[in-house]
Image: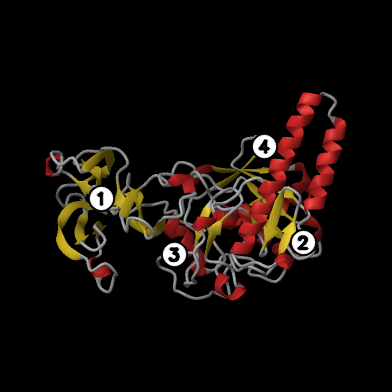
């Protein structure tokens, strides 16, 4: 790896005639060498061995289809150990992008344009799902699918979403899938599109993958079971990893549950949107609620972990709704912080330890339009307010939360 890059540096400098820019080029390339080494060490810190890390030139390819950009050094403090039985990542495609995720076919993939169309149709055919892929020739399409020689084992590769956008690149190893059936080639492409919109390998526990990490595009991931799907594996899942050429060629019933849950087309009430719940498990032990996909560190956040859809509320005010205000509460000398949501600004406006952050979303102050109560709980050990419409949830939950009140009504 070092040798190759050094050779590249020498070739580059040989081509540059201006002395000043020659020096600059050397500096840039040296920085590149250092960074790629750091990325390599980072991958190893995730538990991968040298022979599991493939050098693709610009990226490292690890564990089937995880890509790490050599020029982007992930923050190794983000790596946490431990395995749980879950499957999804932490970041998803933003609400406004979901209905029109544009996909460009790089000319290198023209040979499999029919398979790409079929793969798109697999996802688009799911009912009650807001995700919809559209083929596009625009250079700024959300996803571009490239042919890439990923070696003799790997059929495809993708990042996961960041900044509320799907992975910008999907790589397919055309040489490797050439001998597969049409349905299997289509599956490989559909599988990578699944990663691109935020799904992890369903069978990641069996394939020995790391639960958490950071992809080459800086998207942090944390394998998370998607509500409504059982903990464990699903032999029929199109999102099973390591099954190129032999895997499921259609979405399983649980794959469909997962994508419908994450990207519902028809919310319980027209005009509402899913409000995502996050929990800061490493720093503030704080619950946070937002409908904005890139609210938290643009998807590279590794502290606030996605916990699912909390409820449905309105992104803009409609008749009968009121603003729900968000505050951030810290106490001097105490590192814990707490997001606090209220309909009444007078609750805390005179307390300088509550910092006003704005309107979170719009809700009802009474049970209008079939809305249901959202209850507030308090944990003194976590210094955290927790909001849920499901009172059974706190049973057995860490933090010893006690009941406070109904704060608002949502769906
Ligand atoms: Zn995969």
Circle 2 — which element?
A: helix
For marks 3 and 1, give the one nearer the viewer: 1
The residue to which callout 3 is attached is 226
Which residue is label 2 attached to?
Answer: 177
156 and 301: which is toward the camera = 301
Query: Toward the viewer: 77 or 241?
Result: 77
| Residue 114 percent location from the top left of the image | 72, 52
The quadrant holding residue 157 is: bottom right
Closer to viewer: mark 1 or mark 4: 1
Question: Which labelled disc corresponds to residue 115?
Answer: none
Q: Secondary structure at mark 1?
A: loop
Q: For mark 1, does the 10 Å Cα neighbourhood hold few (<14), some (14 to 19), or many (20 or more) residues?
A: few
Residue under the image location 64 percent in, 53 percent down: 39
Whether residue 32 sits left or right of residue 121 in the image: it is right
Q: Which mark is residue 333?
A: 1
The residue at which mark 4 appears reads as: 137
Quadrant including the C terminus: bottom left
């Amino acid at each position: 790896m070092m040798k190759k890059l050094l050779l590249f540096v020498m070739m580059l400098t040989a081509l540059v005639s201006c002395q000043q820019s020659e020096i600059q080029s050397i500096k840039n390339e040296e920085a590149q060498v250092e960074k790629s080494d750091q990325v390599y060490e980072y991958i190893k810190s995730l538990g991968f061995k040298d022979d599991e890390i493939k050098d693709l030139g610009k990226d490292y390819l690890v564990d089937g289809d995880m890509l790490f950009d050599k020029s982007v050094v992930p923050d190794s403090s983000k790596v946490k150990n431990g395995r749980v039985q879950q499957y999804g990542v932490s970041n998803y495609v933003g609400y406004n992008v979901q209905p029109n995720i544009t996909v460009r076919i790089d000319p290198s993939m023209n040979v499999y344009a029919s398979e790409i169309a079929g793969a798109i149709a697999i996802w688009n055919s799911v009912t009650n799902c807001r995700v919809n892929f559209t083929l596009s020739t625009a250079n700024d399409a959300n996803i571009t699918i490239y042919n890439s020689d990923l070696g003799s084992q790997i059929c495809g590769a993708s990042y996961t979403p960041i900044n509320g956008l799907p992975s910008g690149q999907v790589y397919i190893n055309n040489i490797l899938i050439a001998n597969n059936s049409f349905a299997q080639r289509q599956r490989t492409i559909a599988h990578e599109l699944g990663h691109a919109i935020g799904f992890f390998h369903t069978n990641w526990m069996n394939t020995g993958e790391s639960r958490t990490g950071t992809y080459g595009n800086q998207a942090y991931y944390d394998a998370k079971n998607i509500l409504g799907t059982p903990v464990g594996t699903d032999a029929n899942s199109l999102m099973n990893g390591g099954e190129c050429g032999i895997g499921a060629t259609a979405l399983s019933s649980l794959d469909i549950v997962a994508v419908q849950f994450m990207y519902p087309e028809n919310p319980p009430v027209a005009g509402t949107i899913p409000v995502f719940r996050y929990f800061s498990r490493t720093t503030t032990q704080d619950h946070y609620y937002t409908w904005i996909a890139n609210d938290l560190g643009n998807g590279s956040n590794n502290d606030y972990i996605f916990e699912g859809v909390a409820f449905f509320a309105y992104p803009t005010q409609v008749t009968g709704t009121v603003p729900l205000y968000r505050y951030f509460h810290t106490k001097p000398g105490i590192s814990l912080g707490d997001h606090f949501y209220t309909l009444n600004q007078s609750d805390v406006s005179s307390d300088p330890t509550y910092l006003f952050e704005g309107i979170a979303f719009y809700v009802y102050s009474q049970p209008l339009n079939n809305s249901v109560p959202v209850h507030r709980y308090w944990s003194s050990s976590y210094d955290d307010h927790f909001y849920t419409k499901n009172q059974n949830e706190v049973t057995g939950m860490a933090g010893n939360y006690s009941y406070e009140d109904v704060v608002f009504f949502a769906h």
